Image (cartoon, rainbow, N blue to C red):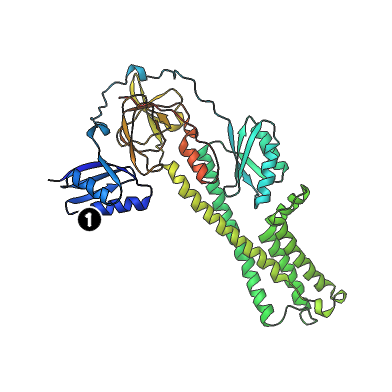
């Protein structure tokens, strides 16, 4: 007769240990299936508990039989059950944790570590800023402290970059995705135009030995020099504008290097075309193709970077996409579905089996199973005073009360950490009741 036995495991420290125990159990003929984690094993089949424990011991680990008291009793939930009087919309008895005000800024024009340093320095000089964290990959900045958003934008503008304050998480994600798509399209066509002109020009000059100015090709190179200038302005104008802004602020960035290199190549080459008598015959080599090739290849690199950034951002933010759009408010009138943005501290939220936790919280009474796969590889039973995290699927649950707004949840902080931020997750408090 098939049955399921749960064993508590000890001594497993890595995935290899889990694999060894799983293989040892599944090699038994009386075992149909074995689900193994570093903490426990659930074995289905006709095997006896003592035999399973012996098998685990032979694999070099320790196991004990888990009793039925280790699991919550999944009694069916009914919609007619009234919420306990102790878990209505009363204020929390304990004071709320103090949180540090924070502003998220989207930065325009950053291209290198020097840009990051300048933006960070400019933000930290604003009155009220306790800390500023700038992320080059996300093209954004997280500012902590009692600072005026308008002063933050003015400080970034004075440093030679653009900025806008976006405190709403959903709006920030949408604007970043839109900015990445727009930048990828712009860099792609700029790279295509520059390379479409530069590659044939380079091949023609190398094969025909036409890179040196002579009397026979003077008119042709004069025309090509003007066309090269137009292509440089069309495909590399953003490099020159950024370099000019940096020069006005007394600094230099990667755009400065690109602008100086391509401009120097074009100015020298066009000077040779205009005044060939001032240059010896050995120095009349032209570098028009170098200018457009450099711009084309760098634009191509930026396009690939934007595409990779867009994909990685989507992968990380799928975590937030797991958040339900609505929460179930439980009050004296019964259950009401409300938008997640309307959830406020002190509200009582009901969680049913199959729901996802809408906000971070703390269980006040009762017990529930939560799938914490995004944090740990196991399902956990949470009881009174235990914390639960937004986005977690509920395998069995009753009720919850939140004490923080959705934008301050640990899931949002986790996305920022994975994106390159370091932000200490704030402990939020939901309340589940039996």
Q: Position of residue 205 (x, y in %)?
A: 69, 78
Report whether residue 129 is seen: yes
Left or right, 47 with respect to 105, comes to left
* Vertical arrangement, residue 302 with respect to residue 151, above or below: below
User: Is residue 346 placed above or below 152 in the rendered structure?
Assistant: above
Q: Is residue 59 above or below residue 365?
A: below
- Residue positioned most to the right: 278
Q: Tell me if 361 is positioned left or right of 300 in this view.
A: left
Pinpoint residue 87: horizontal percent, then vertical percent. 36, 20
Does the image show residue 71? no
User: Which quarter of the rendering shows the N terminus?
Assistant: top left
Residue 93 lies in quadrant: top left
Where residue 254 sits, quadrant-wise, is bottom right
Q: Is residue 229 above or below residue 87?
A: below
How many numbered circles are shown? 1
Mark 1 secondary-structure assignment? loop
Residue 255's spot in the image, x, y percent?
Answer: 69, 56
In the rendered image, the quadrant that contains the C terminus is: top left
Q: Residues within 10 Å of mark 1 (few under 14, many from 20)?
A: few
Q: Which residue is mark 1?
A: 27
Left or right of residue 432: residue 239: right
Looking at the image, which residue sits at the far left?
A: 1
The structure residue drawn at horizontal position 48% and vertical position 41%, both measured from the top left corner, is 414
The percent coordinates of residue 235 (x first, y second) are 66, 61
Q: As rendered, which of 122 and 340 lies closer to the eye?
A: 122
Between 51 and 186, which is closer to the camera in this rendering?
51
Q: Nearer the viewer, residue 83 or 217?
A: 83
Q: Does residue 297 appear to the left or right of 20 in the view shown? A: right
Residue pictured at 43% horizontal, 43% vertical: 319
């Amino acid at each position: 007769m098939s049955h399921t036995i749960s064993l508590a495991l000890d001594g497993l420290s890595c995935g290899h240990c889990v694999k060894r125990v799983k293989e040892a159990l599944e090699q038994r003929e009386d075992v149909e299936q074995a689900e193994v984690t570093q903490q426990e094993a659930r074995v289905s089949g006709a095997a006896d508990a003592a035999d399973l424990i012996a098998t685990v011991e032979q694999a070099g680990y320790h196991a004990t039989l888990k009793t039925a008291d280790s699991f919550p009793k999944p009694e069916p939930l009914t919609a007619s059950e009234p919420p306990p009087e102790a878990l209505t919309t009363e204020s929390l008895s304990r004071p709320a944790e103090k949180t540090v005000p924070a502003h998220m800024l989207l930065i325009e024009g950053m291209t290198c570590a020097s840009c990051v340093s300048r933006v960070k320095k400019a933000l930290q000089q604003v009155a009220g800023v306790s800390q500023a964290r700038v992320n080059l990959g996300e093209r954004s900045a997280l500012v902590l402290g009692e600072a005026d958003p308008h002063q933050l934008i003015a400080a970034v503008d004075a440093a030679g970059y653009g900025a806008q304050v976006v405190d709403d998480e959903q709006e920030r994600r949408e604007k970043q995705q839109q900015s990445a798509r727009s930048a990828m399209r712009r860099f792609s066509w700029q790279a295509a135009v520059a390379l479409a002109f530069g590659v044939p020009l380079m091949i023609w000059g190398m094969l025909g030995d036409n890179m040196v100015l002579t009397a026979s090709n003077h008119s042709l190179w004069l025309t090509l020099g003007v066309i090269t200038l137009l292509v440089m302005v069309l495909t590399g104008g953003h490099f020159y504008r950024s370099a000019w802004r940096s020069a006005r602020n007394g600094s230099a960035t990667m755009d400065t290097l690109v602008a100086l290199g391509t401009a120097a190549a074009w100015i020298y080459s066009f000077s040779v075309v205009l005044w060939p008598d001032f240059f010896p015959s050995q120095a009349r080599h032209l570098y028009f193709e170098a200018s457009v090739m450099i711009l084309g290849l760098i634009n191509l690199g930026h396009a690939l970077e934007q595409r990779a950034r867009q994909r990685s951002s989507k992968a990380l933010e799928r975590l937030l996409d797991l958040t339900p759009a609505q929460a179930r408010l439980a009050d004296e009138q019964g259950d009401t579905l409300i938008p997640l943005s309307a959830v406020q501290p002190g509200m009582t939220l009901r969680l049913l089996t199959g729901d996802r936790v809408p906000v971070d919280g703390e269980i006040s009474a009762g017990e529930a199973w939560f799938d914490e796969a995004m944090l740990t590889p196991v399902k956990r039973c949470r009881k009174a005073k235990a914390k639960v995290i937004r986005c977690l699927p509920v395998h069995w649950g009753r009720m919850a009360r939140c004490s923080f707004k959705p934008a301050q949840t640990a899931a949002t902080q986790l996305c920022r950490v994975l994106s390159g931020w370091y932000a200490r997750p704030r402990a939020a408090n939901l309340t589940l009741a039996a």
